[in-house]
Amino acid sequence: MPLLSVVVPTHNRSDYAISCIESTLHFADPDLQLVVADTSSDRRLYDRLHDGTCSFLRDPRFVYRKIDEPSNLTKNHNDAVALADGKYVCVIGDDDCITGAALEAARWADEQNLPLVSQTLSANYAWPDFRSRFVGMGHAARLYVPKTLRAGQWRASGADLQNALSRALQGTENLPRCYHGIVRRDLLETIRQQTGAYFHGSSPDMSGAVSLACLVDRYFEVDTPLSIPGASGGSNSGRSAMNTHKGDLSSDTQTSSFKDSGWTAGVPRFFAVETVWAHAGLETLGKLRPDLLPDFDYARLIALCMMRHPEYRSVSEAAADEVLTYFGQNIAAATKRKLTAETWERRLYLLRRLSMPTAANGRRYFGGVSSIAEASHRYEDYARAQGIAFTGISDQ
């Protein structure tokens, strides 16, 4: 049994996936396994891997499965995790990479008999095709690295989940990460046994975070990068940066399968980051801790949707009516107050963003980085030079 399985679902993104595979297999460690579940319709990744000049499939640590049956983002993540053999699992995207610290964290967690180690995502990489509304190509081909790192800390899962519910589950920060975290396989199997799958709803990263917060009392979180998220032009991160990551539920495979099978009451019925996070988190919470559902802040979710996506205002208003119909909560006044507060907060954010002299705004970075594989090498060199390594603590 390998100690750590790095799990990568991919779909029609061979250029990114090949670089991700290269960056992972570069770590010559027998305790490592790489699992790639490929649902691509273009077959480009399959053809590249089976080209006689490609050596990846000859590495016994590499598990590749071409899946031709219909799928979506969540199903692909579930299928990918099911292929992993490692005692611990780290799920990343096909434009991301792990660091050497991921293996160190897995070894420490195994020694301490801990179910998971999470991280704050202190490093990140923007592919050359990444664009944003505010700085255009300012982040493109840059690897951002941390200047300083805090010591690892224990966090209380229950308190973190309550805070996340009060924020309408808008992001997985300050939650135990399954996506970009190190999670023991038996904990993932517990989730599957209790709920029927590892991930639910339209966002595997949010679903995994909520599941872990429901099942563990506390977890260890570090600033030390265990992986490096990559933001590419065609990814969800890239589309969000350009404010194009939205549409009717049927317009994206991430949500289309849920349009008819069921969409969570009280969540506006359109596709956007805000609704996808809420949908996945609430679906998961309903399977593990339905008693916590009343703590979700529907007024904040609907206010955010109205402010950020005004073209879907009528859909958001319909969701507020659902909250009254299904849960008996009249959130009209609360939504109005929070819409005003969120609008002012957004204006302040835009003013702060426009006042920043550069895209980096003081962050340390390396420029001209052409791929996640190069980013991986550059980061490991930087970590060695700076003495950055995973450090656990013995006091549990």
Image: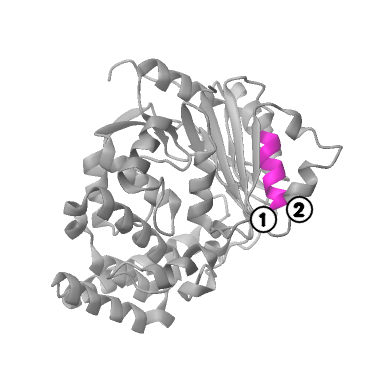
Residue 378 visible somewhere in the drawing: no
- What residue is pinned by disc 2? 44
In the rendered image, residue 14 lying in the magenta stretch gets the answer yes
For the residues labelled 2 and 1, say whether their Cβ atoms are less than 8 Å apart: yes
Q: What residue is at 41 percent from the left and 72 percent from the top?
A: 260
Q: Position of residue 5 (x, y in %)?
A: 54, 31
In the rendered image, residue 63 lying in the magenta stretch gets the answer no
The magenta-colored residue range is 13-23
* Frontmost residue, 178 versus 357: 178
- Residue found at the far bottom of this picture: 314
Q: Secondary structure at mark 2?
A: helix
- Residue found at the far right of this picture: 52
291 over 350 or under it: above or below: above
Disc 1 marks a residue whose amino acid type is Ser
Q: What residue is at 28 percent from the left and 17 percent from the top?
A: 395
In the rendered structure, find residue 40 and report the number of the disc placed on it. 1
Q: What residue is at 46 percent from the left and 73 percent from the top?
A: 249
* Frontmost residue, 77 versus 135: 77
Q: Count numbered badges in the picture.
A: 2
- Residue found at the far front of this picture: 69
